[in-house]
Image (spheres, helix red, strand yellow):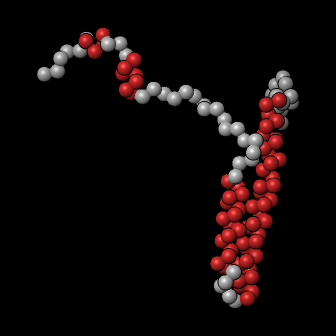
């Protein structure tokens, strides 16, 4: 396989260090979520072992906690800037149009 010759391909700009930091903070979240899912599966196994449905009433708690852990943002999160400015609405675009253009029309009957 022949790769194209791109100058500076191995040099990464300083701005790419942010995803690396984000990946490091994502690992503890995934570990906590995996542990909570393991607890939920263990409660189902306990339910099957003791032939009682009592632990099933508690098995949903670790699943809800896992969703909360995964949805939480890390403290240093900064939302990205908008991709592009908001487009003008039809009302503002019509107000910005030249008033002479409306005089060129024929009156409606």
With 109 as the anchor, is 31 left or right in this view?
right
Q: Position of residue 44 (x, y in %)?
A: 71, 78
Q: Quadrant of the C terminus?
A: top left
Label total for image: 0
| Quadrant housing residue 77 | top right
| Quadrant housing residue 99 | top left
With 19 as the anchor, is 53 left or right in this view?
left
Camera-side residue of 30 and 57: 57
Residue lying furthest front: 75
x 79%, y 34%: residue: 16
x 40%, y 24%: residue: 92
Residue lying furthest bottom: 51
Q: Position of residue 21 (x, y in %)?
A: 82, 42
x 79%, y 65%: residue: 35
Q: Position of residue 80 (x, y in %)?
A: 66, 35
Q: Position of residue 48 (x, y in %)?
A: 71, 85
**Does 103 appear above or below 76?**
above
Observer able to see residue 11? yes
Residue lying furthest left: 109
**Does 41 appear above or below 23?**
below
Camera-side residue of 5 and 106: 106
Q: Quadrant of the N terminus?
A: top right
x 77%, y 63%: residue: 34
**Does 105 appear above or below 92?**
above
Observer able to see residue 5? no
């Amino acid at each position: 396989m022949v790769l194209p010759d791109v100058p500076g391909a191995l040099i990464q700009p300083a701005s790419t260090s942010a995803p690396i930091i984000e990946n490091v903070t994502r690992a503890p979240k995934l570990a906590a979520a995996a542990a909570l899912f393991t607890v939920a599966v263990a409660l189902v196994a306990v339910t099957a072992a003791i032939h009682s449905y009592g632990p099933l009433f508690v098995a949903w708690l670790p699943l809800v906690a896992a969703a909360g852990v995964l949805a939480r943002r890390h403290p240093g999160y900064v939302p990205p800037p908008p991709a592009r400015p908001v487009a003008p609405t039809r009302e503002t675009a019509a107000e910005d149009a030249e008033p002479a253009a409306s005089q060129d029309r024929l009156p409606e009957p």
